Amino acid sequence: METTPNRRASSREELQVLADVALELQKSFKGLDYYNEGHPALSELLTKSFNSITERLQSFDNISLIVKRRGFFSGFHQVGKDIVPLVDLARDLYIRGVRKIFLLNGLKQKDLNTFLYTLHNSPRVLQERGGIDAILVEQGVGTIWVNEISYDKLIGKDLDYRGETDEVASHAMAEGHESKLPESSLTVSRENTKTDPEAPLADDKDVNIDLKELLMELKQGPDKGRLLKILGLIIPIAREDISHGELDLSLEILRELSNFIDTPADNSAGLEASILTTICEVASLPMITHLIERLCQRDNALDTVPVLLKIGDASLDRLLDMMADRDDLHTRKHIAFAIRKFGRQASAKVCSRLSDERWFVVRNLVSLLGEVGTPEDIAHFEKLLSHGDERVRKEVIRTLGKIGGIEGARLILNRFDQFDRSLHHTAVFSLGLLGEDIALPLLRKILNRKGFMSAEEELRAEAVVALGKLKNIGAVPDLESLLISERLFHKESDTLRIAAAKSLVAIGGKDALHAIDKGTHVKRQAVKDTCAKFLKQIAKTTRES
C-alpha cells in the first residue's frame, strides 16, 4: 500500500492509519500542556509517538493530512470523524495557520519535536514570526512539511545545518540535488496551496462581507458551523478596520463574542477556545485602549469588563498603565473596578509595579492589593512601611488589615513604635480587623493609657473597638475597669464606657456578662441604661435560641 499526496487515501485501512498518526500528534501536542520541557515523562511520550508514526510511515512514501476547522481530511474523507480529540486538535492547528501537513518517510525525531514545540506557541506569536511554515524552514525541519514551502530555502537550510556554505548549497541545487525530495510531493504542495476548501473567504457570499454584516449574523445566533466560519472571517477584517482607526464595530463584535461564552449553552470546550482565540487576536493595543476608554464612560462597565477579562494579561497590563497615567479620579475608579474583577490574577502584576517612583501610583496599587491580594503578598509591604510619603505608609497599614493575616498583624506590631503617631489610629484599626490574639498586649496597653488629649482619647476608643473584634476573654478585666470607672480626677467619657460595654457584648461569656451587669449600677445614667438594654437583648436572644 503506497500513499502519496497525489493519491488521496480513501480505503478504510488507509483512513485508520491516518487517524492513528493524527492521534499520536494529538497526544504529543497535549503532553506539552502537562509537562515542562525536559521532563522525563514528556521525553518518553514524544519518543513513543515518534516510534509509532515512523512504524506506520514504513509502508508509505509520505502521509498527508488536510487541516480544516472541523477536523482532519484526506480528500473528501474525514479522518477520525467521531474522535473528539482529533477535531479539537485540527481546530487548534487551523487557528495557528496550518492547512496541510506532510510527514515524509524518514521522519526525524528532532523534526517532530520542533514541529510540536513550534505549534505550542500562540497564534499571535506564530503570525508575528512569519507563520508556521516559515518558522519550520528557518529551524531546518526537512521531514515535516506544512502548507506551501520554499523548497529552495529548505534545501539551503538543510545543507547549511550540516555545515556547508551557501556556495555549496547553490552548487548542490544547480546539480539537481533538489530531486532528493519526492517529486509528487513537490507538485501537490504547489497545487494544493492555490485554494483551501475551508479558507475564510471561500464562499462567494463572504467575499465582500464586512464587520457590520458579521455582527448582524452573530446577533441572530448562527449554528456552530457558521459561527466557526464567522470567527475566521472576523480576524482579518477587524484588524484592517482597527488599523484605520475604525474601532466601534470591532468593539461590538468582541462584546457579542464574549456573550456567546457567558450565555448558558451547549458550547464545547473547543468552540469556546476558538471564540477566545478570536477575541485575543482582535484585541490589539489600540482595541484594548478603546475598550478601557468605553469602560470609563458611564453605564459601560457591565458589558466591557467581561471582554477585558477574556483578553487576560494584555488588558490587565493596559489597565494598570492607564490607571497610573490618568489624573481624573472618576476614570481611575472605573479602571480600578475592572482590575479588581481579575482577582488573584492581578496581584502578581500589581506587586511588580510597587517600585514606581510616583507616590500616588504606589498608593493606588497598594489599595488594589487590599481587594485582590493574599497574605503571600505582604512580603512586599515591609519596605513600603518606610516609604517617603505618609499617605503610602497609611495605605499599606490599612491594606495589611484586609489581607495580612497573622503575619500582617506581626508586621504592624513590630513596627508600631516606629510609626508616626498619626498612623497609630490606622494601625490599631487594622489590628482589630485582623483579629489576631497576638495584638492583645498592645491593645490593652493603649487602653490603659491615661491622657487628656483628644487624639489619645480617640486612640483608646479605637483600641476598645479592636478588643471587641479580637473576642479574647483576656480583655474582659480591662474593659470592665473602664466601664465601671468612677474616678474623681479622671472621669472616663460616656462614649468610651459605652464602647467598652459593646465590646464586652461582642466577647461574650460569663465574665463579660457579669461585667455588663456591673455597668447597670454606675452613676452615669447613659451608661447604666445602655448596659441594661444590652442585658435585655442578650436574654431575649438566649430564650429564642
Image (cartoon, rainbow, N blue to C red):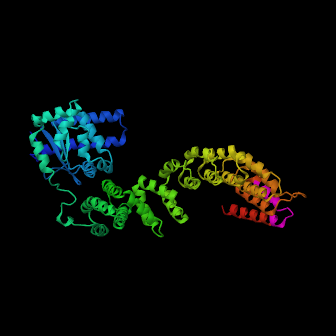
Q: The magenta stretch spans which residues?
A: 512-528
Give the residue drawn at x 50%, y 48%. Answer: 348
The residue lying at 49 percent from left, 52 percent from top is 346
Residue 214 or 515: which is nearer the viewer?
214
Q: Taking the image as drawn, is residue 401 in sight?
A: yes
Is there any visible trace of residue 24 in the rendered image? no
13 or 373: nearer the viewer: 373
Question: Can you say which quadrant of the picture contains the N terminus?
Answer: top left
Say left or right for 111 vs 419: left
x then y, percent, for residue 400 = 62, 50
In x, y percent, where is residue 358? 57, 53
The quarter in which the C terminus is drawn is bottom right
User: Is the stretch drawn in magenta largely helix, strand or loop?
Assistant: helix
Identity of the residue drawn at 25% across and 46% down? 132
Furthest toward the top, the residue is 163
Q: Give residue 222's position: percent from left, percent from top.
A: 27, 65
Query: How many marks are shown on the rendered structure?
Result: 0
